[in-house]
Image (tube, helix red, strand yellow):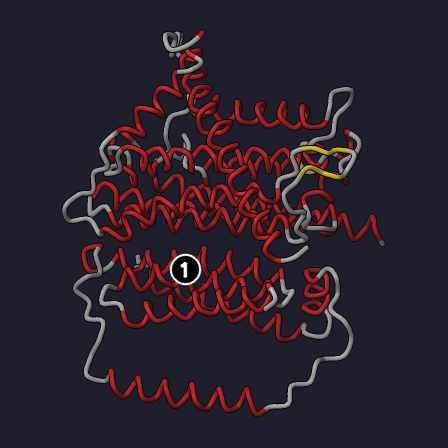
Amino acid sequence: MPWYLELLRAIGGTILIFSGVAVIAAMFGVLLERKISAWIQSRLGPKHVGPQGLLQTVADTLKLLQKENIVPRNADGLIFASAVLVVPLAALLDYVVIPFGTTRWGPLIFRDLNIGILFFAATSSVVVVGILMAGWGSNNKYALLGGLRSAAQMVSYEIPMGLALVTVAMLAGSLSTVTIVRAQAHWWQLYIVQQPLAFIIFLIAATAEVNRVPFDLVEAESELVAGYFSEYTGMRFALFQLGEYGEMFAMAAMAVTLFLGGWQGPLLPPVLWFVIKLYALVFVFMWVRWTYPRFRIDQLLNFSWKVLIPVGLLNLVATAFVILLVHR
Amino acid sequence: MTGEVLAFYVLGAITLAAGAVVVTSHNIVHSAVALVPAFLGVTGLYVLLNAEFVAGVQVLIYAGAITVLILFVIMLTEGGTGLRLPQRNEQGPIGAAVAVVIAGLLTAGVTHTAWVAGPGALPAYTPAAIGQSFLGPNLLAFEVSSIVLLVSLVGAIIIARKEE
């Protein structure tokens, strides 16, 4: 294929991912979040726009699009404006390596990279740069504190997440997401059955990476207004929300791919299985958010460095030992 | 012009432009943030060389972790702004002269060397080959570098922790 067609395909793919994530993850995700929080708190949630409040987020998005774009007087204009691009872009890049299902022509994935998991870890680690840029560029003490907390938190939780990823990669013998899904053909081969510890570590680290309760110190409303995006208005605020929900759905999709067998399942079509598992995990994220209180920052960092990392390392060594015994 | 050549020049331009911002900017945070496109440009060059694993590690460690570390350190000093730190001193011209001389020497060295391609073909899946190499022929270098990292880690903790 000539390079300009390849480039066009990449641009098309980007537009597809962006609109898909914007509609399915961000808009529907916000609605789901509000409905589930209402259900957990014995309320009704959005009810008036559209049938059962289904169009509430559409209305909110239209409202945000029309709002004035305010830049604080002493903000660093360039960094303030470019931070908005980094966060959603890094979140969208995660979707390149996620296999959504399989068809007659092969798995439904943008690129089955042979460094799939590494690519995922790498792109999701770039989100922190955007958050720090937003926090610093706003020239606001709450935003800066939120940005600094996020840097400490995300750098700490990347390590246990990496350990969980490595464990799965060792079992599957590959970093490619498609190969990992194919290695989980039967229920006893699912990595949630073989590696329950790695699954729990991954889920906890993923919750921390996307800054959700109980790890939402980055944007703790009661202390920091809204954390790193306190100063953002209108569409820029919406783009941060898009990045956040996009990242959450990407983490859930990656957990489905690595531990729950991806698109595989009996009877139903593969894509449907993927969506069912994805939304089940997204529900777990939301359930946790509306059930648990927030950690303190020292508890949060202690938990990562003194619990998750040692447990992850032990799990890694034990897995390596078992693989050595079984395969030799 | 093939796509690869075009990609090489575009990536080279991005890396160089970002690098120029890193050294010339008056604002230390701008310098640190400009490291990200510079690192990503280098990542693209690695991809062009079929070194996907190195490219992934480059993004994870350099763009994702080193930049964050630098930004974190800047924001913890000087009241969180880093703006009052002087970015230049009277040694600027000397530094520029040294940089030009080194660039000239490197260019001359690279263009006058007869590069020989290594024997054999690239493996299709580089991570496994890199792992084999680390735990096989290059075990000593691998272990030595991990010990150096461990020592610096312990040292940093001892320096940072106050005596109780």
Instruction: Locate residue A301 relative to residue B125 in the image: left or right.
Output: left
Rendered-image quadrant of the N terminus of chain B:
bottom right
Residue at 22% across, 54% down: B80
Q: In the rendering, at what x and y percent does residue B70 appear?
A: 35, 61
Rendered view: A85 above or below B91: above
The number of numbered discs placed on residues in the rendered structure image is 1
Residue bearing the label numbered 1: B36
| Chain identifier of the residue bearing label 1 in the image | B
How far across and down, in percent of the image, does residue A259 sit? Answer: 66, 35
Q: In the picture shown, does residue A213 fall above or below A165?
A: above
Residue type indicated by callout 1: Val
- The quarter of the displayed image where residue B78 is located: bottom left
Q: Quadrant of residue B154?
A: bottom left
Badge 1: residue crowd in 10 Å (few <14, some 14–19, many ≥20): many
Q: Secondary structure at mark 1?
A: helix
Please give the name of the residue rendered at 23% of the width and 40% of the height, measured from the top-left corner.
Answer: A142
Q: Residue at x 45, y 7 (%)?
A: A51
